[in-house]
Image (spheres, rainbow, N blue to C red):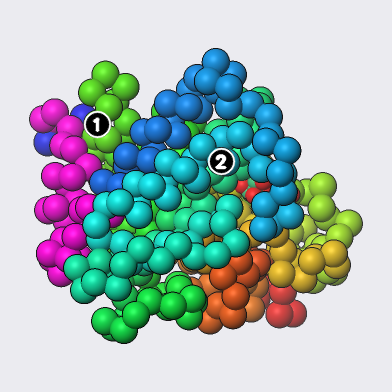
Amino acid sequence: MSDSGDSPRTLADVVADTAPADLVEDGFLTVVGAIASGARRVSDLTRRAALAGMLGDIGEINVQGEIVQVLDAAGTDAFVSSLRDCGAVAALACEELEEAVFVSDRADHPYLVLFDPVDGSSNIDVAVTIGSIFAVYRRSDDAPVTDASLLRPGREQCAAVYVVYGSSTVLVVATEGRVDGFTLDPASSEFLHSHEQIRIPSQCAAYSVNEGNQGNWHPEMQAAVADLRADYGLRYVGSLVADFHRDLLKGGIFLYPGDVKSSAGKLRLGYEANPLCYVAEQAGGAGSTGSERILDVQPEILHQRTPLIVGNADVVERVVAKLAE
Ligand code: P6P
């Protein structure tokens, strides 16, 4: 129920009223609607999983070198088609696709979307929360869209969206200065306003990292995590969107550092770290590589990896300071 006690408002109504006017005028609602459409499809498949033939893999390896889960393929199809056909997106890039998809150079297609259609998909076999993550940019000019158009620092995002398919399906939209959550109502299939103007709580409630990787961390990261361990409990789902959503609502810090095996870590800059750090910053948090603000990193390649430390700004700063000691 919204703060006023009235029946909750729909995603379209709230975004129309709260997103920056220039975005709304240029078709932002269409982009959000396309994301919501794909999210309904993924939510339905996730809820029915085994009954919908969504378990296991399809026997292929994607551009990330990861085994493609059945739901990865279904989620990719759902979001690529909804975003490609919505009429406002000039180009899109997807974690599962090596190359970008170029849709239209028309001026009435002003948006670029980079996304991870189903993050943590291997968790579906064991009914653990998964997610979808979207970075939204406006074209910087009317020039034809190229691969270079998609290599933008995260600070140039005009919006970010993620969906968490957990005990409920929640779609979170961030635009400048505002983050709102919408819960999928199974009865109406509407995303209804359930989390008004989300701000990360001032108190960090937990740290979130795969402690099993500790032996691979560089000594300064081992010391930084030991410093957190002294003050906070550990919460780690192993599904990025689940861990992030908990930290956003309850306070917390998530870390996926680089290590001796991969200096850039595991997570992707363009469609994981950038959109989630955009959400975090609009909610009063922060996101760092450990040495630099995530949103200031200039991508060199589409599927670039990055170390990620995101959550309460004071605790992110504490980790960065510890790493610099
Ligand atoms: P690890 C899921 O595979 C994922 O990409 C993220 O959702 C999650 O945060 C991370 O990997 C977990 O990785 O190495 O801890 O299993």
Mark 2, residue position: 73
Please check the rendered image and state whether residue 122 is part of the magenta-colored stretch, yes or no: no
Question: At label 1, which amino acid type do we have?
Answer: Glu
Q: Is any atom of residue 313 visible in this view?
A: no
Q: Main secondary structure of the magenta part?
A: helix
Residue 2: give x, y in percent of width and height.
Answer: 19, 35
Q: Position of residue 86 (x, y in %)?
A: 27, 52
Relative vertical location of residue 22 with respect to residue 9 in this rendering, above or below: below
Going 16% across and 56% down the picture, which residue do you hit?
18
> Residue 56: x and y, percent?
68, 29
Q: Please give the count of numbered marks on the rendered protein.
A: 2
Residue 301 versus residue 136 in the image, above or below: below
* Disc 2 element: helix
Q: Amino acid at mark 2?
A: Ala
Q: Nearer the viewer, mark 1 or mark 2?
A: 2
Magenta residues? 5-31
Q: Which residue occupies 71% across, 44% down?
A: 60
